[in-house]
Image (cartoon, grey):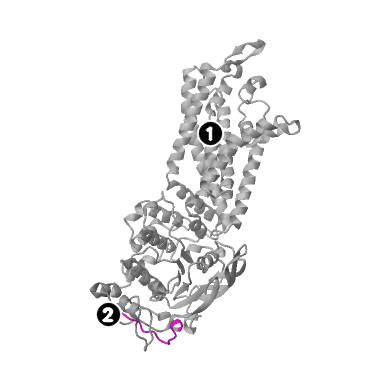
Amino acid sequence: MTTPDAQQTPGTGISVRGLTKRFGSFTAVDDLTFEVAPGRVTGFLGPNGAGKTTTLRMLLGLISPTAGESLIGGRRYADLPRPMTTVGAALEATGFHPGRTGRNHLRVLAATHGIPDSRVDELLGLVGIPAAARKKAGGYSMGMRQRLGLAAALLGDPDVLLLDEPANGLDPEGIRWMRGFMRHLAAEQGKTVLVSSHLLGEVEQTVEDVVIIANGRLVRRGTMDELHGEPAVLARTADPGAGPRPGAGRAAGRGRARPGRGRAAGPHRRPGRRGRRRAGGGAAGARAQTAPDRPRAALPGADRVARAPQPQPLDRDGGRLMMTLVRAELRKTSTTRISWTMPVAMFLVGGLFAALQGFALVSFGEIPGPDGQTIAPVEAFGETAIARLVYTGGFQFGYLLALVLGILSMSGEFRHQTITGTLLSTPRRGRLILGKLLALAVVVTLNGLAFIAGSLVGGGLILLSGDVALFPDAGGLVLTLLRLLLVLVLWGLIGFGLGVLITNQVMALFAGIAIALLVEPLLSFLIQFLDPVAEAARYFPSQATTAALDLFAGVDAEAAAVFGGGDLLTWWVGALVLLGYALVMTVIGWVVTTRRDVA
């Protein structure tokens, strides 16, 4: 599709060969083949629904093709060792967490490749939103979101830039800025720029080559000159003295002027009424047509800013790469409200239910004793068991909150459409899942410590008021609390798998809580009347959790049964059962994530 000179230009090109994608009986892309040369701006054109976005998503590994292949620099996107330094993509203006600032959005992406925060601030200045970047992205206009998306695409100073309808939401000044910036990146820095649009008029002043598709099939490919049917193109302009724009067409060894928005016309064509309206419009129209197509920061400065400092290579050091990914995931959590609301909730829940449990056991509780008499729980259980029961009094609500954390870690990505940016920065999905699981384990552990702190405070106050020793067996109590942390982490992993299976966040939360609080107790009640399977209730997640905590160690079976501690599995069997649930849900989440299309 390109000229010989363009094909010889060194750089990273794009190759699409026989690409096909079917969704059931519907064919979105049908045997599409084209190439994009480096050092040029190529327009990817077609009406809405033609298959442009689907093609770009297949190129970026977000959607698996039914047939064919798409390569960037001779490699699949998922095989690129440092994808953000090779390809930058801005596919949609909605892939931002509404509670995260624009700057933090870029910092999260930059962390996956070890890119410093200074690079983030430089790009925010380049795209013209340095002040707004500290506001939450949920309040951004469409134009601001487009600029933020472009900054994200430029983070790694990529050789290839893919832009899907980049002019959407931009004002006229922003559109001129975008045109000039794309031309600068291609002509001055030799980057490969592929920009999609459904309007030729939006891109004809910018692109040098075009690929046109309709109904998922290739219609035409070639240069803009070939599209207009003339070896050279004349463009109407409101400035009779306007000459060729600097740097335009260098890769192909020619220059042509297309300032303004009028359609290209051959030497013997006269502009029609619509063209005259575009070229006219008085002084205001002239200013609009002849305003320089340059970023506010000026294109020479853009060359300095757009070059990212190259961090040390990570792809050959698997452990260091994984640590970088985990830190990025932790930054993702720390830049939203859940970073403080969940620890506060954990602390309050732990303290409240520990206090209630202690109040019931120490102040008012009585249980059946020998000879039909009732005795205080402290006498029946002993101070060691009482301390265990009090400090873990709200563990059922603790593991529900851990379940919620696990669900949010994945379903939140789909709810806010940040999953696209996540997969673009880390396209190897198995590695991404492992990083997310490790980060989730850290987050749940930290929140579990907040839960334990609340339990120690709330429960300790009640034990002091009842003249019960706070730590009658410190070693045993520490072991119990460590088991509690393990239980919370396992429930977080269960929630992770559930969040992958049910991408609708509200439905995932409802399903998880309903299963734990309604479905499991109901099944336990029903199967107790079925002798062959009556013992199965002990293997349910909640029962296995109670067993794994070993709260009733050394307590008489009859006394333990009063508090639901009768007929439980041994602690290590309960721990293994709960671990089995976590592994099954984790594997399911792993498999589904690696195979799911992100459309």
Q: Using a 10 Å C-alpha cutoff, classify the residue at mark 1 as few (fewer than 14 neighbours), some (14 to 19) or many (20 or more).
A: some
Seen in the picture, residue 319 relative to 163 is either above or below; the reply is above
Find residue 492 and report its horizontal and vertical position in percent: 56, 42
Nearest to the eye among marks 1 and 2: give it. 2
Residue located 54% across and 28% down the image: 393
Foreground pick, 554 / 410: 410
Q: Main secondary structure of the magenta part?
A: loop
As helix, strand or loop, the secondary structure at mark 2 comes to: loop
Seen in the picture, residue 240 relative to 162 is either above or below; the reply is below
Find residue 225 and report its horizontal and vertical position in percent: 43, 83
Find residue 81 and report its horizontal and vertical position in percent: 54, 63
Judging by the rendered image, the residue that carries numbered circle 1 is 397
Name the amino acid type tagged 1.
Phe
* Residue 39 is one of the magenta-drawn residues: no
Instruction: Judge from the rendering whether residue 295 lies leftward or rightward of residue 327; answer left or right.
Output: left
* Residue 234 is one of the magenta-drawn residues: yes
Instruction: Judge from the rendering whether residue 370 lies leftward or rightward of residue 383; answer left or right.
Output: right
Residue located 50% across and 49% down the image: 412
Find residue 302 and report its horizontal and vertical position in percent: 35, 68
Give the residues drawn in magenta, as a range: 226-237
Q: Earlier in the sequence, mark 1 or mark 2?
A: 2
Foreground pick, 163 / 250: 163
Judging by the rendered image, the residue that carries numbered circle 2 is 239
Quadrant in the picture for residue 201 = bottom left
Give the Cα distance between marks 1 and 2: 71 Å
